[in-house]
Image: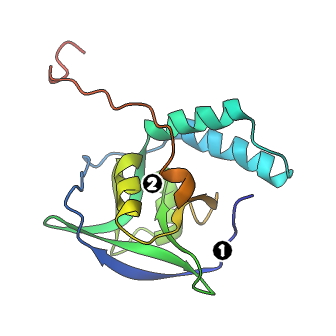
């Protein structure tokens, strides 16, 4: 069942030299959001998520660009961490799309939505003491804990050296 957190936000500064900033474009991840919603329905009903649905979710997660609220200065990324009121859980907020980001941070936030691959965020978890990732905190409130994330069987990254010629 997704963990519902009462949270407040504070800034944590982390120098992370592998930040990959994608060109700014409107991010939607419609298929990923539909998988979140399907899985959430099972949680709400108190049922176990079917294996085939979890596999579809992981596949979709592996090809999605997710947004982190951050400030990039040179090679460093400053980002927000969400903390439970009892300070027992620290999570990284990620967003499936621009609308979910704006719903949480507003349009005039000091933070910008920065799109990256889930693998970068898993690396960030491995280099920190964060407990997991909370997706779309103001709407879906879908928490994946560190233990699950670092062991996700993500699809392999396919690299090409043809600079996308002929596509």
Would residue 135 be visible to someone looking at this image?
no
Q: Crowdedness of circle 2 by 10 Å Cα count: few (<14), some, many (20+)?
A: many
Q: Which of pointers 1 and 2 indicates the residue nearer the eye? A: 1
Q: Residue at x 33, y 32 (%)?
A: 157
Examine the image and state in which quarter residue 127 appears.
bottom left
Does the residue at mark 1 contact the one at mark 2 (Cβ under 8 Å)?
no
Residue 59 image offset from top left, x and y in percent: 52, 33
As measured in the structure, the alpha-carbon distance from the residue carrying label 1 to the one carrying label 2 is 22 Å
Q: Residue at x 38, y 69 (%)?
A: 128
Disc 1 secondary structure class: loop
Give the vertical position of 96 relative to 164 (above or below): below
Residue 138 image offset from top left, x and y in percent: 60, 66
Q: Residue furthest top?
A: 166
Q: Nearer the viewer, residue 62 or 95?
A: 62
Tell me if 128 is positioned left or right of 14 in this view.
right
Residue 162 image offset from top left, x and y in percent: 15, 19
Mark nearer the N terminus (1 vs 2): 1
Residue holding disc 2? 98
């Amino acid at each position: 069942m997704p963990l519902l957190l009462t949270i407040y936000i504070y800034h944590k500064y982390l120098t992370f030299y592998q930040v990959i900033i994608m060109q700014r474009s409107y991010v939607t991840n419609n298929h990923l959001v539909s998988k979140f919603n399907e899985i959430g329905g099972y949680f709400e009903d108190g049922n176990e998520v079917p294996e085939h649905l979890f596999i579809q979710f992981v596949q979709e997660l592996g090809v999605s660009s997710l947004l982190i609220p951050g400030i990039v200065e040179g090679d460093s990324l400053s980002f927000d961490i969400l903390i439970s009121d009892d300070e027992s859980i620290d999570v990284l907020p990620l967003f499936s799309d621009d609308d979910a980001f704006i719903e949480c941070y507003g349009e005039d936030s000091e933070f910008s939505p920065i799109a990256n691959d889930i693998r970068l965020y898993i690396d960030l978890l491995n280099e920190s003491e964060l407990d997991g990732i909370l997706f779309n905190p103001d709407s879906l409130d879908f928490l994946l804990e560190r233990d699950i994330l670092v062991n996700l069987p993500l699809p392999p990254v396919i690299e090409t050296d043809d600079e996308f010629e002929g596509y």
